[in-house]
Image: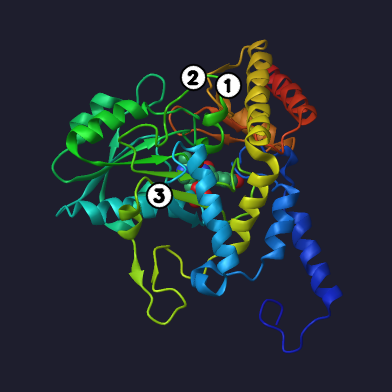
Amino acid sequence: MEFGLQKEGLSKDEVMSLLDWARKRDLPYSRILSSMCTDPHPIAVEAHVKFIEANLGDAGLFPGTKCIECKVVRMLGSILGNPDAVGYITTGGTESNIQGIRSARNMAKRKHPNIIVSESGHFSFDKIADILQVEVRKASLDENFMVDLGSVEDLVDENTAAIVGIAGTTEFGQIDPIEGLSNIAQKEGIFLHIDAAFGGFVIPFLEKEYKFGFEVDGVTSISIDPHKMGMSTIPAGGLLFREKRFLKGLSISTPYLSTKAQYSLTGTRSGGAAVATYAVLMHLGYDGLKKSALRCVNMAKMLVDRVENFGVYPIVDPIMNVLALDVPKIEKVLLMLLVRGWRVSVTRKPRALRLVIMPHTTEENLNLFIEDLKEIVKNC
Ligand code: 0PR
């Protein structure tokens, strides 16, 4: 019965020691430079635990939690240029993207719907192709790893249900030309979904202004993830629509629940994560979020300056805290970094060393990483 359910239960201490065993095998975030998640803010943890049983899937039973979710949506809307946007707290970027495209597909009523996303799109769009039965057309990238507008125009046809713009690509941290995409979408009367799952909590705080939110007229919906740069607990994603009718397009009747309809993908869903997001946003405010985001962006810049001294250059000028570095003999370098306990990742095309500098990264650890990288590159 080693792996099955035991007939008799264990004591709390015994269970906890099993958990401790598992916990020790998990990696602490300190040496992880590959993740877009991070240690949640302590206030998020406290808030989540306080609302641990709250189920937003039956919101009529939890009106207090629902009220907080509405306030979170309003705050996310204000970060994204429209406090009146409507939406809900999802399980993350994947659900937000699925639901954004589901709304677009349902509204467009095309016979053989297709959507257009760049080659740099997150793999959630490949899941979308399968789940929603839409053709996902991949637009090519320009020399800066942003979507090529000409390629998007070439791919649009009468069956296009949505165009997707990415504000903070997973691999390169680049921002698609959202205003250009908006022009195409508006000209053709097509839904424009923005995947700002990562960039939503970074781009608004950058010194240079990038228009990517609802201030761009053609933008219909946006994904923005509190469980990434928003330092909330997992699972906390955000999906926002410019107008209520797009959310209504997702509505399913729920006759025996305390509410008449449900627009989320999952039924039962975490109130804890929504409240955790509220706690972080209220506690940090605009200034605190900006400070945290810029700290990461500045550390990323510092890293680039330092590695350039030993001949390692970014393959594209970084805009935010996602870096793709061109290192010689990359496979060997990746292995040596792993041996030294660093968790890094690699981009698909071209193969480059991908680093994400998150709130858990300290300057001290980054210095250790740079020293290790320098030594490894020298000896490779
Ligand atoms: N959109 C973008 C732009 C993303 O970067 C991601 C995830 C998603 C959507 C999907 O979000 P969810 O994973 O919340 O559904 N980006 C990271 C990635 O796939 C997520 C990640 C996080 C990966 C932590 C690893 C990790 O340790 O690379």
Q: Tell me what residue is drawn at x 70 percent, y 46 percent.
A: 39
Sequence-wise first label, 2 or 3: 3
Q: Amino acid at mark 3?
A: Asn
Q: CA distance from mark 3 to mark 1?
A: 33 Å
Q: What secondary structure is marked by label 2?
A: loop
- The residue tagged 2 is 316
Q: Position of residue 339 (x, y in %)?
A: 72, 37
Q: Is residue 348 or residue 201 the one in the foreground?
A: 201
Q: Judge left or right: residue 59 versus residue 49.
A: left
Q: Position of residue 64 (x, y in %)?
A: 60, 65
Instruction: Answer above or below: position of 350 versus 65.
Output: above
Q: Position of residue 367 (x, y in %)?
A: 76, 24
Q: What secondary structure is marked by label 1?
A: loop
Residue 380 appears in view: no
How crowded pointer 3 is (Cα within 10 Å; few <14, some 14-19, many 20+) is rated as many
Q: Amino acid at mark 2?
A: Val
- The residue tagged 1 is 327
Sequence-wise first label, 3 or 1: 3
Q: Judge left or right: residue 9 versus residue 271.
A: right
Q: Tell me what residue is drawn at x 50 percent, y 30 percent.
A: 173
Give the number of the mark in front: 2 or 1.
2
Q: What secondary structure is marked by label 3?
A: helix
Residue 321 appears in view: yes
Q: CA distance from mark 2 to mark 3?
A: 26 Å
Q: Amino acid at mark 1?
A: Val
Q: CA distance from mark 2 to mark 1?
A: 13 Å
Looking at the rendering, in which quadrant would you find the C terminus? top right
Query: Mark 3 vs ligand 1: CB under 8 Å?
Result: yes
- The residue tagged 3 is 97
